[in-house]
Amino acid sequence: MLMPSVPQCKNRVAVSDIPEGSLIPLQEVLEEMVRLHQQFLTLLQREKGLMIEGEVNPLIRCLTEKEGVLGQLHQLEAKRQQAMLPIAKGVGVDAHMLTLKRLIPLVSEPYRSRLQSAHERLAALSASIVEINEINALLVERTLQQVTTLVGLVKYIAQPLSTYQATGMLKDYTASGKTIGRG
């Protein structure tokens, strides 16, 4: 009796139970997702620096780049879901219920370690992205508070000033800058 090249273990599906070559497209999609998450993290770090420096035009370009990367990530997520369909069918699980974390223990080496590596890198990148996003949100909030304070100051400075006339009546007029009273 011939032994299968990849043994079937308890709670583990042999790679032969999964359609031929279906793990390779998944790995390729995951590697591309890792690359784009790294690119997105770099953009967030650049965005933070541009917000601190107050560079408006480069910040707008950075935001446009971020939107492009997010669009690519959205497309890759759809590809990842498509790549999971034959795998889910092979292991007899509903495709919506099969996540990468659930798939990893079901496959044999070398696929398991490759999927685990991609999963860990994506988790680490996601945590870093969340952290930088929170910092950037605080920067935006602080900048908004400063702008609101400055607008209030400008409104106060631009208000019409009232002065007393010799008759005792108030005269309102718009003045720029500060008014120096006569003694």
Image (cartoon, rainbow, N blue to C red):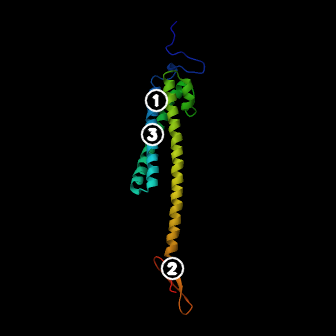
- Reading the chain from its start, which is encountered first: label 2 or label 3? 3
Q: Is residue 137 visible?
A: yes
- Residue at 55% in and 28% down: 103
Residue type for callout 3: Gln
Label 1 packing within 10 angstroms: few (<14), some (14-19), many (20+): some
Residue type for callout 2: Pro
- Spot the residue most to the bottom: 167
x%, y% of residue 134?
Answer: 54, 48
- Which one is in front, 73 or 133? 133
Question: Above or below — where is 77 with respect to 50?
Answer: above
Apparent side of residue 37 relative to residue 10 in the rendered image (left or right): left
| Real-space Cα separation, disc 1 to disc 3, in angstroms | 17 Å
- Residue at 45% in and 44% down: 70
- Which one is in front, 116 or 106? 116
- Spot the residue most to the front: 183
Tell me the SS state at disc 3.
helix
- Reading the chain from its start, which is encountered first: label 1 or label 3? 1
- Spot the residue most to the right: 10
Apparent side of residue 65 relative to residue 149 in the rendered image (left or right): left
- Residue at 51% in and 10% down: 3
The disc at residue 38 is: 3
- Residue at 50% in and 74% down: 157
Select label 1 or label 3 by which is in front. Answer: 3
- Which one is in front, 66 or 19? 66
| Real-space Cα separation, disc 2 to disc 3, in angstroms | 54 Å
Q: Are marks 2 and 3 in contact (CB under 8 Å)?
A: no
Q: Which residue is mark 1?
A: 27
Tell me the SS state at disc 1.
helix
x%, y% of residue 151?
Answer: 50, 67
The part of the image, by quadrant, that contains residue 176 is: bottom left
Question: Above or below — where is 140 with respect to 70?
Answer: below
